[in-house]
């Protein structure tokens, strides 16, 4: 394999959506290798949010290969997403000015509410767009779209808050990995994703109280708006993958969210 010859490492593909991730082995050493990972990785490594970056190398076909320390451990279970440690690492990302400066310098995407809205609309299958719940969701999103915040009020968002992207090491250190969807946006873009994927709607207000104390009606409204956005995006992704069982499950979730707004 050409890539193995160039790197000097034996590569073992790791399952994932991109097919660009490997476990690299040489003698008794192991590394996590990935092609064309976000250049943002170095900053995340310095802050201890992702495993330590060891080296970066441009290979013959122009791809960039990054190597991180191999972290023995496991991804989180769905039931563990309510852990306070999950919230702490998300808050750490949102509150980091150095990460924000770095992502902005690298030309990271800056998303407004209208960008999320049109991401939902773009290239949606006509039969899905015609679904009554999706039409109801678009009506809600259009009517209650929050005002766009200035750049200084946006934060680094992970963009794919999934239990599969939280890695718990054998030493009980929690990492947040897979930053290909990182963007600068309202922090509720991540929080809405977390809640709609892992919490029952009836639990949301208690969750906000527990993590953020007293909250205003505008915070409540914004949380629901971003939750509906993320629900529609998940349903759109399920449909594109022809994962109709998960799509129908997420349609039921969306119905539950819309019944609360």
Image (cartoon, helix red, strand yellow):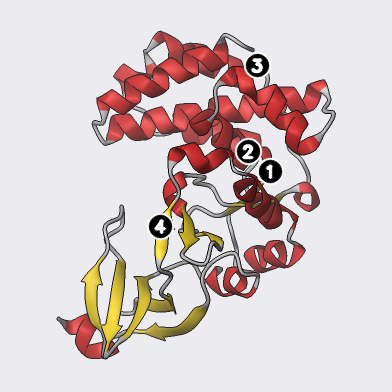
What is the spatial separation of the Cα atoms under label 2 and label 3, in whole angstroms?
A: 21 Å
Secondary structure of the residue carrying tag 3 is helix
Residue at x 79%, y 48% (from the top left corner)? 153
Q: Are marks 2 and 3 in contact (CB under 8 Å)?
A: no
Residue matched to label 4: 74
Q: Position of residue 214 (x, y in %)?
A: 85, 29
Q: Are marks 4 and 2 in contact (CB under 8 Å)?
A: no
Foreground label between 4 and 3: 4
Residue matched to label 3: 143
Please tell me which residue lies in front, 5 or 54. Answer: 54
Q: Position of residue 184 (x, y in %)?
A: 64, 52
Left or right: 92 in relation to 122: right
Residue matched to label 1: 187
Quadrant of the frame with the C terminus: top right
Foreground label between 2 and 3: 2
Residue at x 60%, y 42% (from the top left corner)? 190
Q: Position of residue 57 (x, y in %)?
A: 40, 85
Classed neighbour count for the residue bearing mark 4: other residues with Cα under 10 Å, few (<14), some (14–19), many (≥20) = few
Q: Which mark is residue 109?
A: none
What is the spatial separation of the Cα atoms under label 4 and label 2, in whole angstroms?
A: 23 Å
Q: Position of residue 182 (x, y in %)?
A: 55, 55
Quadrant of the frame with the N terminus: bottom left
Sequence-wise first label, 1 or 4: 4
Residue at x 52%, y 18% (from the top left corner)? 138
Please tell me which residue lies in front, 90 or 206. Answer: 206
Foreground label between 3 and 1: 1
Foreground label between 1 and 4: 4
Reply above or below: 145 against 111: above
What is the spatial separation of the Cα atoms under label 4 and label 3, in whole angstroms?
A: 42 Å
């Amino acid at each position: 394999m050409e890539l193995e010859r160039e790197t000097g490492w034996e590569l073992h593909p790791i399952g994932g959506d991109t097919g660009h991730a490997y476990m690299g082995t040489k003698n008794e050493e192991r590394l996590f290798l990935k092609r064309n990972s976000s250049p943002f990785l170095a900053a995340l490594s310095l802050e201890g949010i992702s495993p330590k970056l060891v080296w970066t190398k441009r290979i013959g076909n122009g791809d960039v290969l990054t190597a991180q320390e191999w972290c023995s451990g496991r991804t989180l279970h769905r039931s563990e997403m309510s852990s306070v440690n999950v919230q702490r690492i998300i808050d750490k990302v949102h509150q980091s000015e150095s990460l924000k400066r770095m992502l902005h310098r690298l030309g990271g995407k800056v998303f407004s509410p209208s960008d999320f809205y049109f991401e939902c609309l773009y290239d949606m299958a006509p039969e899905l767009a015609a679904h009554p719940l999706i039409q109801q969701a678009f009506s809600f999103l259009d009517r209650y779209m929050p005002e766009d915040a200035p750049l200084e009020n946006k934060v680094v968002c992970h963009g794919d808050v999934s239990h599969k992207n939280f890695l718990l090491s054998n030493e009980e250190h929690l990492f947040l990995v897979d930053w290909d969807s990182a963007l600068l946006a309202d922090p509720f873009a991540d929080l809405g994703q977390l809640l709609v994927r892992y919490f029952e709607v009836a639990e949301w207000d208690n969750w906000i109280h527990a993590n953020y104390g007293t909250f205003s009606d505008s915070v409540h409204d914004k949380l629901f708006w971003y939750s509906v956005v993320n629900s529609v995006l998940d349903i759109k992704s399920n449909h594109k993958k022809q994962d109709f069982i998960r799509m129908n499950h997420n349609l039921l979730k969306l119905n539950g969210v819309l019944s609360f707004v």
